[in-house]
Image (cartoon, rainbow, N blue to C red):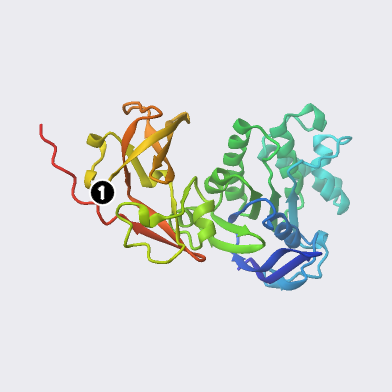
Amino acid sequence: MHIEVRNVNKAFGAHQAVRDVSFTIERGKLIGLLGPSGGGKSTLLRILAGLETPDSGDIFIDGKRVNDVKPQLRGIGFVFQNYALFKHMTVFDNIAFGLTIRKASKAEIRSRVNELLDLTGLRGFEHRYPHQLSGGQRQRVAFARALAPKPELLLLDEPFAAIDAKVRKELRTWLKSLIAELGITSIFVTHDQDEAVEVADEMLIVQQGRLEQQDSPIRIYTDPQTAFVAGFIGHSSVVEEPGSLRGFEKAVQAAGARAIVRPEFVEVGRTYEIPFPSAAVTGKIRHVFFRGAHLELDVEVGPNRLSAHRSLDQEPLQPGDEVAVLIHRLYVISEESATMVENPLKADPLPVHI
């Protein structure tokens, strides 16, 4: 066990930023810390780094309690979203900064910086200044500077937030490969679900200072443990009265229960396109949005509005079209739990006559 957080709390005045959070992280894992704004992500990261002190609870790194250990002695590298590079220093000197502070020898500094220039693809840029670099290149310098002292733990606070979408995707792939090659335990804060799912070995989902779930991206997506996670992960529709949906009348017993319906749970089309027509209901297309690889449909089903996907290869649908809508499954939300329920009306598809 490399990192252990036990019952950590942190308040700023009347605002409880972190509420009794506990988790463990194995050595070499790349962890995505994900949640809404103000959920406590950055505060947790700063507590791990030693930039904030918890009001209660303990932080252990490699079995050693570090609550009272100064940030510079924790063996942690920190990458900020705004790069925080020194404008008056060259790329070489920015990367060397941490080693210089530690009074490493010139030979050691030169060797380590050259190693990192090659590792981060910055060879040939060592004599440039930050303003002479692209956003992606500046972020690579920030990574290299954080890695120079050979930290045991790398913390990244929304490292790609200031970079355009295309470069951000390239850097995500590069970062995952780099971390795997180095084997360094890393935690990165992000608002971007796609980023977390693509890069992270595990995800920590937090909201209102609480840890909602820790698991692999696949498990969190397919088996959310709380109502918040079910609604937060993915692009979902909230149904206030799921008992009004065909097939789910008996499944929803709790008064006031709601449901989460994801686009991939919904099949929309002409009646002859739906494999289980007896389980489908009639809906009306309200909006059609082009999403590049597919169309996103906004469908009205009774008092409910649902989102569904449709392939570009299928017959186009237009706003105002009446369609058949089949809901394969949904998450029933009761209090704080999320339970997946399959549509029991689905039967064998009707035979196709040729």
Q: Which residue is mark 1?
A: 279
Q: Name the residue located 66 percent from the left edge and 60 percent from the top edge.
A: 208
Q: Is residue 262 visible?
A: yes
Q: Name the residue located 10 percent from the left edge and 35 percent from the top edge.
A: 353
Q: Amino acid at mark 1?
A: Ala
Q: Is residue 127 visible?
A: no
Left or right: residue 227 versus residue 266 is: right
Q: In the rendered view of the protein, which quadrant contains the N terminus?
A: bottom right
Q: Residues within 10 Å of mark 1 (few under 14, many from 20)?
A: many
Q: Residue 324 at what x, y percent from top left?
A: 30, 39
State whether residue 278 is above or below residue 214: above
Q: In the rendered view of the protein, which quadrant contains the C terminus?
A: top left
Closer to the camera, 244 or 33? 244
Q: Residue 309 at what x, y percent from top left?
A: 40, 37
Closer to the camera, 130 or 216? 216
Closer to the camera, 131 or 205? 205
Q: Residue 116 at what x, y percent from top left?
A: 71, 42
Q: Can you tell which quarter of the image residue 133 is in?
A: top right
Q: Residue 293 at what x, y percent from top left?
A: 44, 30
Left or right: residue 310 versus residue 353 is: right
Q: Secondary structure at mark 1?
A: helix
Q: Can you tell which quarter of the image residue 115 is in?
A: top right
